[in-house]
Image (cartoon, helix red, strand yellow):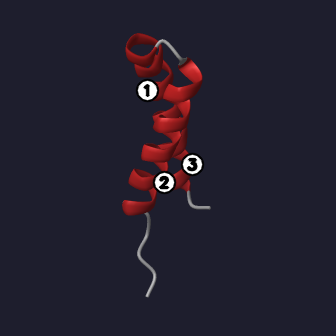
Amino acid sequence: MNNQLWIGCLLGAAVGLIVGQLIFKSPFLGILIGVGLGALVGAAVGPRRG
């Protein structure tokens, strides 16, 4: 995996933990959503190979 994907997942998990605790009252659900969104963003900004 590329560095952007790892960074996106970690940042997404951190933000998801906070948002999940505040909105859903479930940090686990927030982490799952955050990691998923972070992976999408990290993959989108990753290096293009063609």
Of pointers 1 and 2, the one earlier in the residue sequence: 2
Residue at 53%, 28% in the rendered image: 29
Indicate the position of residue 13 as horizontal and vertical percent values. 52, 32
Q: Which corner quadrant of the image does residue 50 belong to?
A: bottom left
**Could you say whether the residue bearing mark 1 is in a helix, strand or loop?**
helix
Residue 7 rendering spot, x and y as whole percentages:
51, 44
Is label 2 in a helix, a strand or a loop? helix
**Which of labels 1 and 2 is toward the front?**
1
| Residue displayed at 59% across by 24% down | 28
Label 2 near label 3: C-beta < 8 Å? yes
Query: In the image, residue 36 lies at what x, y percent?
Result: 49, 46
Residue on which the image places disc 1: 15
Question: What residue is shown with label 3?
Answer: 6
Check disc 2 and report the residue beneath it.
4
Q: Nearer the viewer, residue 10 or 34?
A: 34
Task: Check disc 3 and report its element: helix, strand or loop.
Answer: helix
Give the mark nearest the N terminus, 1 or 3. Answer: 3
Q: Dot 3: few (<14), some (14–19), or many (≥20) neighbours within 10 Å? A: some
Q: Which mark is residue 25?
A: none
- Residue 18 in picture, x, y percent from top left: 45, 17
Foreground residue among 39 and 23: 23
Residue at figure coordinates x 43%, y 63% from the top left: 46
Picture residue at 52% right of the left edge, 54% below the top: 5
In the rendered structure, which amino acid carries the disc numbered 1?
Val
For the N terminus, the image quarter is: bottom right
How many marks the image carries: the answer is 3
Could you classify mark 1 by the number of other residues whose Cα lies within 10 Å: few (under 14), some (14-19), or many (20 or more)?
some
Q: CA distance from mark 1 to mark 2?
A: 16 Å
